[in-house]
């Protein structure tokens, strides 16, 4: 049982860490491309800014979904119940 809990803790930390890393890289690329586009065509900057904020919101949503799944596995781990059923049966 301790091995399942330990493996779940490692999986949760990898899930949150890689999610944060991916969002950080995505926002960095997005911000850089926005600045390039705004520098090349300043008249399009307001339209590009609106689209950039929409994509930033979607990137944050991906990270929050990852955190939600990680919290689910941390506090309501379904694997422990399956392990207990397998050991009892």
Image (cartoon, rainbow, N blue to C red):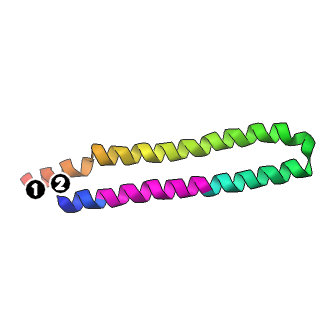
**Left or right: where 54 falls relative to 85:** right
Q: Quadrant of residue 71?
A: top left
Q: Main secondary structure of the magenta part?
A: helix
Q: Residue at x 80, y 42 (%)?
A: 48
Q: Is residue 89 visible?
A: no
Residue 78 lies, with reference to residue 10, above or below; the image says above
For this orientation, the residue located farthest to the left is 88
- Determine the secondary structure under disc 2: helix
State yes or no: discs 1 and 2 in contact (Cβ < 8 Å).
Answer: yes
Quick one: quadrant of the N terminus?
bottom left
What segment is highlighted magenta in the picture?
8-24
Q: Is residue 63 visible?
A: yes
Q: Residue at x 32, y 48 (%)?
A: 73
- Give the residue number, with chain letter if any, for mark 1: 87
**Left or right: where 72 falls relative to 44:** left
Residue 50 position within the rendered picture, expressed as x and y whole percent measured from the top left: 76, 36
Verify whether residue 21 appears in magenta: yes
Q: Residue at x 31, y 48 (%)?
A: 74
In the rendering, which numbered label is found on residue 14? none
Q: Which class describes the residues within 10 Å of circle 2: few (<14), some (14-19), or many (20+)?
A: few
Cα separation between marks 1 and 2:
6 Å
- Give the residue number, with chain letter if any, for mark 2: 83
Residue 6 position within the rendered picture, expressed as x and y whole percent measured from the top left: 26, 60
Q: Which class describes the residues within 10 Å of circle 1: few (<14), some (14-19), or many (20+)?
A: few
**Left or right: where 16 falls relative to 5:** right
- Determine the secondary structure under disc 1: helix
Residue 60 position within the rendered picture, expressed as x and y whole percent measured from the top left: 57, 43
Verify whether residue 46 appears in magenta: no
């Amino acid at each position: 049982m301790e091995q399942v809990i330990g493996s779940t803790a490692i999986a949760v930390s990898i899930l949150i860490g890689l999610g944060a890393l991916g969002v950080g890289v995505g926002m960095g690329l997005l911000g850089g491309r926005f600045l390039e586009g705004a520098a090349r065509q300043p008249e399009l900057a307001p339209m590009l800014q609106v689209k950039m904020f929409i994509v930033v919101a979607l990137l944050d949503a991906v990270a929050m979904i990852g955190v939600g799944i990680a919290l689910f596995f941390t506090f309501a781990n379904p694997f422990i119940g399956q392990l207990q059923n397998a050991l009892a049966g």
